[in-house]
Amino acid sequence: GGTAVVVVAAGSGTRLGLGIPKALVPLGGRPLLAHALDGVIASGVATRIVVVLPPGDTELVGVCAGYAPAHPIHTVTGGASRTASVRAGLDAAGPGIDHVLVHDAARCLTPGWVFSGVVEALRAGADAVVPAVPVVDTIKSVVASASPRIGPEIVAGTHERSTLRAVQTPQGFRLGRLLAAHAEASTWEADRAVSVTDDAALMEAVGETVYVVPGAPESLKITTRIDLLLAETLVSNGYE
Ligand code: CTP
Ligand code: MG
């Protein structure tokens, strides 16, 4: 069966604060989405590429159209949350697809070998796979302080760093399993205070085993201006 790659690019880029959708923000003179699609295509893993775009967009549709006819890209409109956008992309995965990779357009410098590593684990039998890198910071949980005059938060605990990983995209799944997890999650997500920030969390919530493969340091998620500065430096040093 085939492998679909769903690139979610329907976010507004609020934290970047440039007044245009993040996927359209230029990096080395080209939109973030173009860099992301170059990585997907270079990996050679996709039998079908689906890009999820903001409602009313015309410019990003144009970026996608530029890859035809060699690499036709299917575009669909996203939703209000990342999860809703992923669902729209999964609905467009098409027939004959066994595996799906869900990738953030905001991770626009992910190298092809990360895509290949995720697909290898799927072919070896995994139903869920995430690329990840070791965490460099010490990570602590916090709770509200009883003395806000001194400070708003206090430390509740410290996590053993050697067991922690920073998880990236593309995240790979057996399509049927991910669809089932999304369907189950839609029945309870409205009741949960926590936000679902990745697809693997939905698989974890329904008891699936999620395998971890190596991620890449240059596969950073562009979220704030400082990330964009770092990405510009990476691009001007040959990272593509
Ligand atoms: N995304 C999406 N649909 C949404 C929200 C996010 O497709 N409704 C995508 C973004 O385009 C991005 C990825 O999910 O590729 C990760 O989201 P994030 O980094 O939060 O991007 P934005 O939501 O655009 O940024 P912000 O939260 O600062 O507005
Ligand atoms: Mg967001």
Image (cartoon, helix red, strand yellow):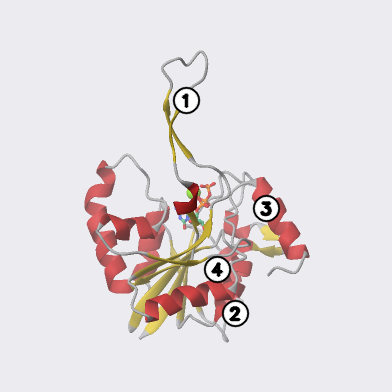
| Residue under numbered circle 4 | 61
Q: In the picture provided, is 112 more to the left or to the right than 94? A: right
* Front residue of 157 and 73: 157
**Alpha-carbon distance for marks 3 and 2?**
22 Å
Q: Quadrant of residue 172?
A: bottom left
Tell me which label, 2 or 1, sits earlier in the chain: 2
Q: Is residue 44 above or below residue 142?
A: below
Q: Position of residue 63 (x, y in %)?
A: 60, 70
Q: Residue furthest right?
A: 236
| Residue under numbered circle 3 | 228
**Alpha-carbon distance for marks 2 and 4?**
20 Å
| Residue under numbered circle 1 | 153
**Alpha-carbon distance for marks 4 and 3?**
23 Å
Q: Quadrant of the N terminus?
A: bottom left
Q: Position of residue 10 (x, y in %)?
A: 49, 57
* Front residue of 55 and 200: 200
Q: Quadrant of the C terminus?
A: bottom right
Residue at screen point 44% across, 77% down = 119
Q: In the picture provided, is 2 more to the left or to the right than 203? A: right
Which amino acid type corresponds to the residue marked 4 in the rendered image? Val
| Residue under numbered circle 2 | 42
Helix, strand or loop at disc 1? strand
At label 3, counting other C-alpha atoms closer than 10 Å, the crowd grade (few under 14, some 14-19, many 20 or more) is: some
Count of marks placed on residues: 4
Which amino acid type corresponds to the residue marked 1 in the rendered image? Glu
Q: Are marks 1 and 4 in contact (CB under 8 Å)?
A: no
